[in-house]
Image (cartoon, coloured by chain):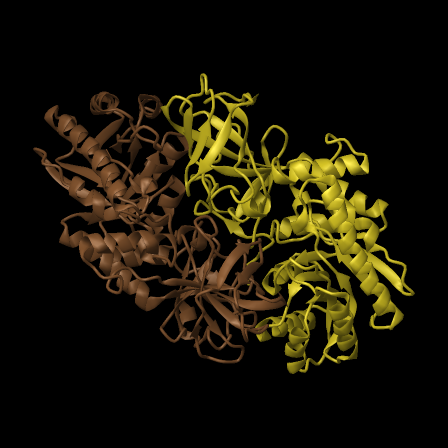
Chain colours: A yellow, B brown
């Protein structure tokens, strides 16, 4: 098997110095490379260690203080090295989106995995069974939201039942049972089925986040009330199959609002699980805006809250007309699905000083390999470097197969790889 | 160095069968895997060999018949195996967007490379010089569009001059000199500079493609007239430094319209070079629409023209309310930047028959890991599979580290890897 923990990197990996020899990931931090000094080719995505460490601790403490577990969504980074840091910081386990992703989490050492999706294909069910056989003590749960799905699982006549969480949805949403009746009927069927173990209840609120406090609260309250109602009904009928019932919710946008609903009063012990993913690097765009409201609600200043840990550096390749700079960075390098990148700082060519960019500088668009920086560009010159913030960590992580971790002086002190 | 031509793949690679042993890429075609039979986990991007072969030949013949060379843009696929097929089909060389990408093309055997970007960073110029030293006979050109860029190149006092193409732009465009005067002045400076060899003239028309025949023609004619004018001026002043002058243009949307402008009547021999990239797999969305107009203009039926060679297969994971199916496929698997995926066919669970989907079925959105299929879904069931077409090959290729090549019965007969 390829070594996902410490693979060999070389100049065929984007962002790797052209003249450096092939190195194991773990050797990169000792090379003395400096992003500021131009030791690595641009564009380059970097992760700042200080902000990363802060975020790992902040979110774990957030959960610890509220008596809930953290199962960070690994699909954000798909980085075994970040998975290890999340587990080391105290995470209950990891959330993933697919069985293939779960395999990478297992390689990283996770032994409690929640696949926040309906699993039903034969190949996937076989793969889960094999993973559990290969890794003793591995707990792997996935979501159930229909009798049709349950029947597909039953058709396999599994030797060991699959652990499932009942997914609760709302009309107009994504997956999940739409009514209390449908959910309760499915819980009864699951409890009665030898093919699955009903381990708890799950929902996902993140897609509905508007960044409007009253609306977000109203939506989340309604969803979590539905979850609580179904958990109580299932508990009353003794439909849960474990001594401890898992109740899980939580993306990265309005995660504080679901917390009160993660601890319903059942006859069995309840384990509340939050599944936020983007917190690990946070961002300078979409999640910054949404989490600023979280900060207000939980009484934390933005300075004390989650910090943007990821940046993408790019070079000015052309200044073809007044007010326009073309950057050598594009859709292949940074997210563009939840907003354009945000220019943060400029470093004049050959200099080592980061200057904040003027407030009117914006990125107005990206092509595959080019970015459009607009504003009163003043003395900006071809060859200057621009530090970009981003909106949506997930779709920036997946543009890179490795990233350096840097200290506050942008010296490379470690590296991660990704497994998308 | 990692072997980009025949790397080891294993179940940590998305789309790889969970129970298969690690295999070299070149071994995959002999395993007898069938996509239809569910031997590979979904979602899965596949390339159809018949359409791929057709496209390779179609585009090469298009260029051959017009007496121009083809330098396919490699940034589309970043696949060394597709690079080799393009070169084998008769391509002059390859186009790439960055020096890092060019290195992968060199590994694939390319010995003529056009970097369709301004190169100027020290690390990149050093890397080009090193590549040329390591690979005798390697020709590597890049774009020049400003005196500022030229001065950065000169500051390095290169032992061997860099070969450059003068980039011609238009106001409101991306990179490239905006006026004939600026372009001519830069050509004079480049000719006089010991740091560069002025090898020709270049432009890029693709961003302006509207899919409106009259508008596209008017825009392209104006741009190519500007290119011709500058080529003639530079020729008259003997500013080109080689016996043969390269004139290059061409994306994948309106490439036929630039062809007449690739052969200006100069005193030196002219080598016209088209740089289309997306043609290699074509698509079922944006490029299908635009290339249908190309077909009309060149007198080729759509059935005879480029064929969509790439599909993404996904499973129905939930049917939560009437008219909505949630597919286990998302932004991480298929392009979403130039239009949503297009449902093409449905395969009932456990069956092997592909049925065309009803005309009203559409994908209305993608999350990171989920897709929304809407329409009158009739008997569609959880576990059924949907074959999706796509809009924009580039941003689908970069979601996959490997892809199977399949025959018309969806048997896996070969595999490619990508190097993003």
| Whether residue A146 is visible | yes
Looking at the image, residue A376 sits to the left or right of residue B306; the answer is right
Residue A237 percent coordinates (x, y): 87, 73
Establish if A404 lies above or below A150.
above
Looking at the image, residue B324 sits to the left or right of residue B7; the answer is right
> Could you tell me which residue is drawn at 47 percent across and 72 percent down?
B346
Establish if A59 lies above or below B311.
above
Q: How many marks?
A: 0
Q: Nearer the viewer, residue A167 or A100?
A: A167
| Whether residue A89 is visible | no
Q: Nearer the viewer, residue A402 or B338?
A: B338
Q: Residue furthest left?
A: B267
> Could you tell me which residue is drawn at 75 percent across and 50 percent down?
A220
Q: Residue furthest right?
A: A267
Q: Find residue A19 and report its image quarter.
A: top left
Establish if A318 lies above or below B28.
above
Establish if B350 lies above or below A363.
below
Residue A383 percent coordinates (x, y): 42, 26
Q: Nearer the viewer, residue A339 or B113?
A: A339
Looking at the image, residue B269 sits to the left or right of residue B104; the answer is left
Residue A331 percent coordinates (x, y): 46, 43
Residue B235 percent coordinates (x, y): 12, 29
């Amino acid at each position: 098997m390829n070594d996902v923990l410490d693979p060999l990197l070389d100049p065929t990996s984007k962002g790797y110095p052209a003249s450096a020899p092939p190195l194991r990931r773990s050797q990169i931090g000792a090379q003395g490379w400096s992003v500021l000094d131009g030791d690595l080719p641009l564009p380059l995505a970097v992760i700042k260690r200080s902000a990363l460490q802060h975020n790992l601790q902040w979110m774990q403490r957030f959960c610890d203080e509220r008596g809930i577990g953290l199962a960070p969504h690994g699909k954000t980074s798909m980085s075994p090295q970040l998975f290890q840091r999340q587990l080391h910081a105290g995470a209950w386990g990891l959330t993933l989106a697919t069985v293939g992703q779960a395999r990478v989490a297992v390689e990283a050492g996770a032994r409690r995995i929640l696949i926040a999706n309906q699993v039903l294909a034969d190949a996937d069910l076989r793969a889960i069974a094999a993973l559990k056989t290969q890794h003793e003590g591995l707990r792997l749960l996935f979501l159930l939201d229909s009798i049709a799905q349950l029947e597909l699982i039953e058709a396999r006549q599994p030797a060991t039942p699959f652990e499932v969480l009942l997914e609760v949805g709302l009309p107009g949403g994504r997956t999940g049972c739409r009514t209390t009746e449908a959910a309760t009927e499915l819980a009864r069927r699951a409890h009665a089925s030898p093919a699955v173990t009903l381990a708890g209840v799950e929902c996902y609120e993140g897609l509905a986040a508007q960044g409007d406090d009253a609306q977000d609260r109203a939506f989340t309250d309604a969803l979590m009330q539905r979850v609580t109602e179904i958990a109580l009904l299932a508990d009353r009928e003794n439909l849960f199959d474990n001594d401890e019932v898992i109740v899980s919710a939580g993306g990265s946008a309005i995660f504080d609002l679901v917390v009160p609903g993660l601890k319903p009063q059942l006859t069995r012990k309840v384990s509340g699980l939050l599944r936020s993913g983007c917190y690990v690097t946070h961002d300078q765009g979409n999640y910054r805006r949404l989490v600023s409201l979280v900060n207000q609600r939980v009484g934390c200043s933005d300075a004390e809250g989650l910090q943007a840990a990821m940046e993408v550096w790019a070079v000015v390749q052309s200044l073809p007309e007044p007010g326009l700079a073309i950057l050598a960075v594009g859709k292949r390098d940074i997210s563009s699905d939840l907003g354009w990148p945000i220019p943060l700082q400029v470093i004049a060519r050959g200099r080592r000083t980061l200057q904040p960019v003027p407030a009117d500088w914006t990125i107005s668009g990206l092509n595959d390999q080019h970015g459009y920086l607009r504003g009163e560009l003043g003395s900006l010159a071809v060859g200057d470097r621009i530090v970009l913030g981003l909106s949506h960590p997930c779709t920036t992580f997946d543009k890179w197969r490795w990233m350096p971790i840097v200290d506050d002086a942008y010296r490379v002190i470690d590296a991660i790889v990704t497994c998308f």
